[in-house]
Image (cartoon, grey):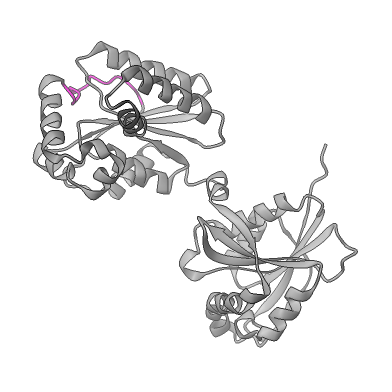
Amino acid sequence: MDLIVIIGSGAVGKMTVGQELTKITDFRLFHNHMMIEPVLEIFGKFDGSVVSKLREDIFEAFMKTEYQGLIFTFMWAFDMQQDWDYIKGVAEKFEATGGTVYYVELVADREVRIERNKSENRLNNKPSKRDIVISEDRMIREETNFRLVSREGEIPFENYIKIDNTNLEPDEVARMIKKRFNLPGVSLTHILNHLRFEEVSDENLEFLLEMQKESFMPLYKKYHDEMSPAIETIEKVRARAAVPSRQYFFILKDGARVGVINIGNNNPDEKDVSCISPIFILPKYQNQGLAYAAIMKAFKDYPEVKLWKLDTILEEKGNCHLYEKCGFVRVGEEHPVNDKMTLIEYEYKVPKAE
């Protein structure tokens, strides 16, 4: 399990950069105030021992997940040995799992940080900062009493980067960090945690058809296939939905209907064989790994299925790549539809459990 420690003075942008980093990597954010704010709310004052206990519980539990790693934000006083010792202890926990620890130090001009201290995102996530006069005074007092910016060469770690983000947007800083440490992108685990299937009722079939038309219309305009789902009738959709051994599902991401998958076949006796026909993702949600995740979820949700089938357009190399990434292999012959388009068949045989 890897760890990214983002350090820096107050309102330098540690949390905001961390938020952007979670969008492009397989790391989750644990910013410092996630534990501080509940303690302040419940106890009416700061209690460092309680905050430390809560942090430890989060660290221990998170290291058992399948994520690549955790982003932890911390205001490090470099003239305080106890802060060096604390970060060392946290780092050792993650290194003990075989993980790598990355250190990101952010620095920015005070005038810029004073403005950032008033930002909506900061105040929404950190209620204790909402009294701007007090929080600004505290921020200035902290950097007066403690050295919150490292000296040249002071941080000895190999995986360390110092970024002056005075004039940089948070998403730009996040991309710099990802590139510098060659961090992996968002994982299947992360996507699946936000994905679920919702059975499509008869009342929602017309809505489904509108989604289908929107998703397939670009292909129809390209190939002019008269069997295209883009010009399918509601009667055909209802007939497919009426087959007892087939089921339509909305693909939901964080509660939003982002696409549709139809699972099953026309022979109720073939419970170990299933087709995926159709599957589609709305254009505005494409290229986020959702179709891949939906197919992986189907594999998981239907363990009784031993053979999966689908067909696609030979000329659509992106679709072919997607299905092959899922484990499908080409079978059978090519089926020309017109002079622009050819259908091909794919199958995926589920490996036997050892």
Q: Position of residue 155 (x, y in %)?
A: 27, 21
Q: Position of residue 38 (x, y in %)?
A: 35, 32
Query: What residue is at 70 percent from the left and 85 percent from the top?
Result: 235
| Lateral position of residue 150 relative to residue 325, left or right | left
Asked if residue 352 shows in the view, the reply is yes
Asked if residue 336 shows in the view, the reply is no
Q: Is residue 98 magenta?
A: no
| Lateral position of residue 158 relative to residue 224, left or right | left
Examine the rendered structure and indicate whether residue 301 appears above or below residue 243.
Answer: above
Q: Quadrant of residue 47?
A: top left
The magenta span reads 147-158
Q: Quadrant of residue 92?
A: top left
Q: How many marks?
A: 0
Q: Is residue 149 magenta?
A: yes
Task: Please state which of residues 89 and 179 is positioned toward the viewer in this rendering.
Answer: 89
Q: Main secondary structure of the magenta part?
A: loop
Task: Please state which of residues 177 and 121 is positioned toward the viewer in this rendering.
Answer: 121
| Lateral position of residue 13 relative to residue 3, left or right | left
| Lateral position of residue 258 relative to residue 226, left or right | left
Task: Please state which of residues 239 and 353 is positioned toward the viewer in this rendering.
Answer: 239
Query: What residue is at 31 percent from the left and 19 percent from the top?
Result: 48
Examine the rendered structure and indicate whether residue 244 appears above or below residue 18.
Answer: below
Examine the rendered structure and indicate whether residue 302 appears above or below residue 182.
Answer: below
What quarter of the picture does the C terminus occupy? top right
Q: Position of residue 26 (x, y in %)?
A: 47, 42
- Tell which residue pokes out farthest to the right in this image: 269
